[in-house]
Amino acid sequence: MHEQILRNLHNKIYAPVYLLMGEEPYYIDQISDFIQNNVLDENQRVFDLTIMYGKETDISAVINAAKKFPMMSPYQVIIVKEAQLIKELDKLQFYLSNVSKSTILVVCYKYGTVDGRKKWVAEIKKSGVLFESKKLRDYEMIPWISKYAKSKNLLIDDKAMIMLNDFLGTDLSRVANEIDKLCITMPAGSNKITPELIENNIGISKDFNVFELQDALIRKDVLKANRIINYFADNKKANPIPMVLAQLFSFFSNLMIFHYLPQKTADVAAAEFKIHPFIARNYLVAAKSFNAWKTMNIITYIRETDARSKGVDNVSSDDGDLLKELIFKILH
């Protein structure tokens, strides 16, 4: 949907009003920034671009501004940021019943949605553009990273994608910003994002991260697992125990499901868990290292460690000690 909106904007197909709402601010910013920077030229923006902020304005001021006529261009552009802070937004209905054809009104309603059954929202659906920007789920992030890198004419290593995903989560703005920064720091003549490039420029260790720990566990590489867990114990802020436990719990919970799939292949695992095929191959290796019974025990160990990290039946062990104990139980 956002791609179609941007295509229309590129082609100078404008709607009189845009309501951009939702939990994911990245797409809202993309659309509103494009309108702000491209509908009017630099000279026109001086006279016919108005930026309003929800915490500093009210709905009457928005309506009055929208009813004005442009001074130096065919359109005036009004962008209302933080619209979720405006009281009585329903009163926008008074303007929407008779919109100005020379105004492009952009309402940015972040971190939530409005009731689609309201009259003023229904009016926008008729005469304008209503867009809901939804948060991506974890399994959607790696394809998104790959697509974003490709849009920048970049190649990206599978492991590099996983490192970005594990470290940055589903924050699209942050991921995009980090990839953009990598473009600037990339060696001359190169267009590939590698684990080494990420380690040197973002600070994510290519050797000491949750993905590498998981890999060491499923391959029963005791030495590597202990090196990583000791690094975690010495760098608790970079590798907080909730993040480590959440990743391990997710993997071993899926491994339990994998044990009972009719067909135990990487393709089946990728489809079942909605993950990248590169990650799915790990389940074949892990199933050989840990049978279903052991996997169930590991899930129990992780839950116990999580409870102890929150103070349940634990008065002295710190997070580092708890992780070391957990890794020993998993491997033995």
Image: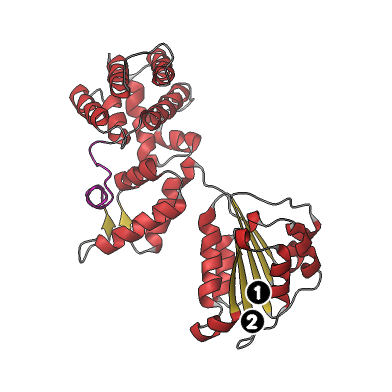
Let me know if residue 38 is in the magenta part: no
When asked about the image quadrant of residue 251, the answer is: top left
Total numbered circles: 2
- Give neighbour class at mark 2: few <14, some 14-19, many 20+ (Cα, 10 Å): many
Classify 10 Å Cα crowding around label 1: few (below 14), some (14-19), many (20 and above): many
Q: What is the x, y in percent for residue 53? A: 59, 63
- x then y, percent, for residue 166: 37, 40
Q: Residue at x 48, y 21 (%)?
A: 260
Tell me if residue 204 is in the magenta stretch. yes
Q: Which quarter of the figure is the C terminus placed in?
A: top left
Q: Nearer the viewer, residue 102 or 86?
A: 86
| Residue that mark 2 sits on | 75
Determine which of the numbered discs, if any, sits on residue 104 in the image. Answer: 1
Residue bounds of the magenta highlight: 194-208
Q: Is residue 25 above or below residue 260?
A: below
- Residue at 30 percent across and 25 percent down: it is 218
Name the one closer to the observer, 202 or 258. 202
Residue occupying the point 44% across, 37% down? 270
Q: Do tag 2 and tag 1 residues touch (Cβ < 8 Å)? A: yes
Relative height, residue 290 to residue 120 (above, below): above
- Give the amino acid type for the residue marked by disc 1 in the picture: Ile
Which badge, 2 or 1, is on the more N-terminal residue? 2
